[in-house]
Amino acid sequence: MYGKICIKLEPRGKTNSYDKQWDDGIGGRIKQIFVWYDEDFISGFQTIYECTESKDQVSLRKVKKRKYEHKTKEMKVVEE
């Protein structure tokens, strides 16, 4: 798999459910997934969900050494 990125989405499950592989706890359909990475590791990922409201919900997972700023429809990465 060198040079490729694979993201496998499993059933969402419930909030605080440890028996499901993909469980973000927000709900809704996934609209976009952003992955920040370099040659050695994935530094973070962000999931944006479609919602019935006027705003999309954003879930952010930060791994290491970077901080992220985001607004509902505008996402940007801010290096430390």
Image: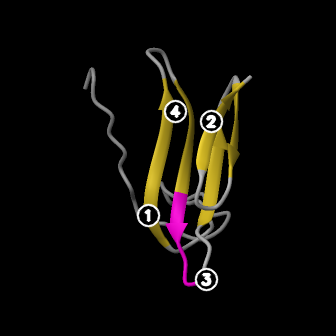
Q: Which residue is mark 4?
A: 36
The reply to whether discs 4 and 2 touch (Cβ–Cβ < 8 Å) is: yes
**Mark found first going from the N terminus, 1 or 4:** 1
- Which structural element holds mark 2? strand
Q: Which residue is mark 1?
A: 31
Q: Quadrant of residue 30?
A: bottom left
**Could you tell me how far apart the alpha carbons at marks 3 and 1 are, in whole angstroms?**
14 Å
Q: Which residue is mark 2?
A: 77
Q: Crowding near pointer 3: few (<14 within 10 Å), some, many (20+)?
A: few
Q: Residue at x 56, y 48 (%)?
A: 46
**Amino acid type for the residue under numbered disc 1:** Lys
**Mark found first going from the N terminus, 3 or 4:** 4
Where is residue 7? Give x, y as percent.
Answer: 37, 45
Which segment is the magenta one?
48-52
Q: Which residue is mark 3?
A: 53
- Which structural element holds mark 1? strand
Q: Quadrant of residue 44?
A: top right
